Image (cartoon, rainbow, N blue to C red):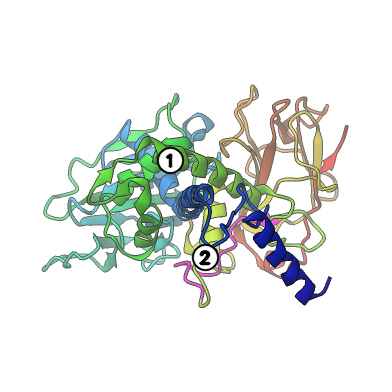
Amino acid sequence: MTKLSLITALTVLVTTTGYAVENNSDYSVKYLDNGYLAPESVESLRKEQYLIKAVTAYELALPIVGVEKWHQGFLTEAKHGDWVFYDNINQKIPILTANQTTPYTATYVDLAESPYYIEIPAGRIGGLVLDIYQRPQADLGVLGPDKGKGGKYLLVGPGQDIPEGHDAEWVIQSNCNLVFLGTRIIGADKETTAKLRKQHFVYKVGTTKEGQKFISASENPKWVNAQSTGLQYWKDLYQVLKNEPVTDVNRMILTLIRDLGISKSKGFKPTDEQKEILVKAATKGDAIAMVNTFSKRSYKYRHWPNRQWRYILNQKHLDLMHPDHYEAKEIASYTYEAFSTSKGMVLPTRNQGSKYLGVYVDGNAEWLDGSNTYELVIPPNPPAKDFWSIAVYNNKLRNLINNDQGNAIVNNKGNIKIESDGSVKVYIGPEAPTGYESNWVQSNKGEGFFVYLRLYGPTEAYFDKSWVMPDFRRMN
């Protein structure tokens, strides 16, 4: 049909029936003879525009709600400025894609209350100061200004003046009030780790570090780091934004949901109709996040073109400010499955920091399923100066798999079986293959899972891709 005849046909359709129909959405658009929209289309489009805006806001807010969920869990056993230690799988089960073996030392502060001092000891420490969008405002330790020699930082909130007469060596001007602080002590034994941890201090300006509290996280936590669902998602988002300046991406989010009863000045007051739209947007937003994060057609790049291993961190800029756009999709898909970014994770630092790759399907591009048994052969000489780790996570809450074995990892720090050529065979399945119990992670039947490869201190063979990891092979 030619362009002219198509236009003629549409004109006849409108003239003879009173409206035209476009079946390209959840609704049909109807026009009256006079060219105006039919009343039923006005009502459908009114709701649809709010839904579209809310789904967009959902994506932008994923990192914020992830920060708030851990914040809520943190406050069940500590106060702002207390350091909490997360060491074993039971303590780390709630955390999005935690590493089971690396000791985590973490705290939260609210800069609306006061500026804070941070003191970090000398040592092989990887630390970060994270904003509500999980953008690193500063690295601490080996990749920070102190370069692993330790030192004193001053953390100042948005719009706050730098206190006169402070004695910090470095000043961090935060763009938000709620700040996550965390460190990992790399490659140290338990005694050294314990000693270095007790030299972490964070305290309000005008007070002293005397009385610093150190708390071992609960072995029976009642919280999860995965973003909340339904209306609670928006409540958690509001809980953060009501305490933050209306700037940057905060303003964009608040603009997108301004017609849905959420406002910094007026509070969280959605009507029943608005609640229905918000719940629907959270449901769709979660599903879209899963598409971008796990899908076989995900936008995420493969490290090796002929392998299924993908970068979990696809942002190119620490501040997410690409010259052409804001890296919303990149940080949203990452923070849906993981928590926190740092210079060492984003930038191509050799022999320092860490690199992560994720895999969600086997070599035949089929979802990894806990009812099956899989084999992964790690070639000799993995490109990791410190150590490598294979960790297994469930796909619902994106946390360490909770199995009867009580283990979610295989790494070269443990007592594993190594083949004569230096390769390592790793197995994931309901039952351990005979002779490979130490190289096995138990899966849960009927539960989907995914896997991370972590390389601590990545070497050149990772960056030039001369070392190649095979895909998972389904055994049964």
Q: Is residue 435 visible?
A: yes
Q: Position of residue 112 (x, y in %)?
A: 20, 53
Reading the image, the residue beneath label 1 is 233
Position above or below: 163 against 84: below
Q: Looking at this view, is 272 or 295 the one in front?
A: 272
Position above or below: 122 against 4: above
Res 29 quadrant in image: bottom right
Q: Does residue 211 appear to the left or right of 180 in the view shown?
A: left
Residue type, label 2: Glu
Q: Is residue 192 visible?
A: no
Residue type, label 1: Tyr
Q: Does residue 66 appear to the left or right of 153 in the view shown?
A: right
Q: Is residue 299 magenta?
A: no
Q: Position of residue 14 (x, y in %)?
A: 65, 61
> What element does badge 2 sit on?
loop
> What element does badge 1 sit on?
helix
Q: Is residue 311 magenta?
A: yes
Please state the extent of the stretch shown in magenta in the rendering: 310-322
Q: Residue furthest right?
A: 476
Reading the image, the residue beneath label 2 is 327
